[in-house]
Amino acid sequence: MPETDLARARECDPAAFERLVTPLLPGLFGFLRRRLGQGAEDAYQETLLAAWRAVGGFAGHSSVKTWLYAIAGYKCADALRKRGREPKTVEAGDALAAEPFEEGSLERMDLKAAVSTLKPEDRSLIFLVYSQGFGLREAAETLGISEGTAKSRLHALRKRLRTSLGGKG
């Protein structure tokens, strides 16, 4: 991400904003879908609109990726508050139905089934770190928890998943 795109986006240049966020969009939608299930499309649009409106005030204390995902996290919380219930997630069976069978498919099925048993906030942490490449600090910032909490939670989650997959704890 060139600094010039960030500077131009802050000056309300839509093309620069688009160049800034486009590489992040597939992962962002996956993050929202895992937390919200149906309704992710609305939260996705609301996130991008809120980011566009706020980019002029983006101070750069975090990466654009962390900043954008944090906005998405707030939009998730808003959507869940409006629904008045727990987050919906894509069922492991639904996600796997579209995947062709290939070497390693059974292991991935086991892992997806094990991950689907986790709490939504734990699935979000796993997704950010292992699917989106966030560091612990960025993931913690995005989820609104301390870095120490993220580190200890991730350690416990890895142990739990390893045990549920038949490995040693």
Image: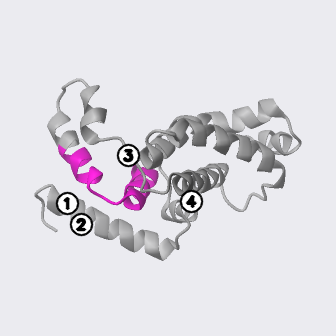
Closest to the observer: 99 or 5? 99
Residue 104, visible in the rendered structure = no
**Magenta segment, which residues?**
110-130
- Tell me the amino acid under the disc marked 4: Thr
Provide the secondary structure element on which disc 4 rests.
Answer: helix
**In the rendered view, would you say 25 is above or below 57?**
above
Return the residue at label 1: 162
- Tell me the amino acid under the disc marked 2: Lys
User: Closer to the camera: disc 4 or disc 3?
Assistant: 3
Disc 2 to disc 4, C-alpha distance: 23 Å
Provide the secondary structure element on which disc 1 rests.
Answer: helix
Q: Quadrant of the C terminus?
A: bottom left
- Tell me the amino acid under the disc marked 3: Thr
Is 34 inside the magenta-drawn segment? no
The image quarter containing residue 160 is bottom left
The mark nearer the N terminus, 2 or 4, is 4
Task: State the mark number for residue 159.
Answer: 2
The mark nearer the N terminus, 4 or 3, is 3
User: Closer to the camera: disc 3 or disc 2?
Assistant: 3
Q: Name the residue at 64% across, 49% down.
A: 68
**In the rendered view, would you say 36 is above or below 96?**
below
Labels 2 & 1 near each other (Cβ < 8 A):
yes
| Mark 4 nearby-residue class (10 Å; few <14, some 14–19, many ≥20) | many
The image quarter containing residue 157 is bottom left
Q: Position of residue 75 (x, y in %)?
A: 60, 51
Return the residue at label 4: 142
User: Closer to the camera: disc 2 or disc 4?
Assistant: 4
- Tell me the amino acid under the disc marked 1: Arg
The mark nearer the N terminus, 3 or 1, is 3
User: Closer to the camera: disc 1 or disc 4?
Assistant: 4
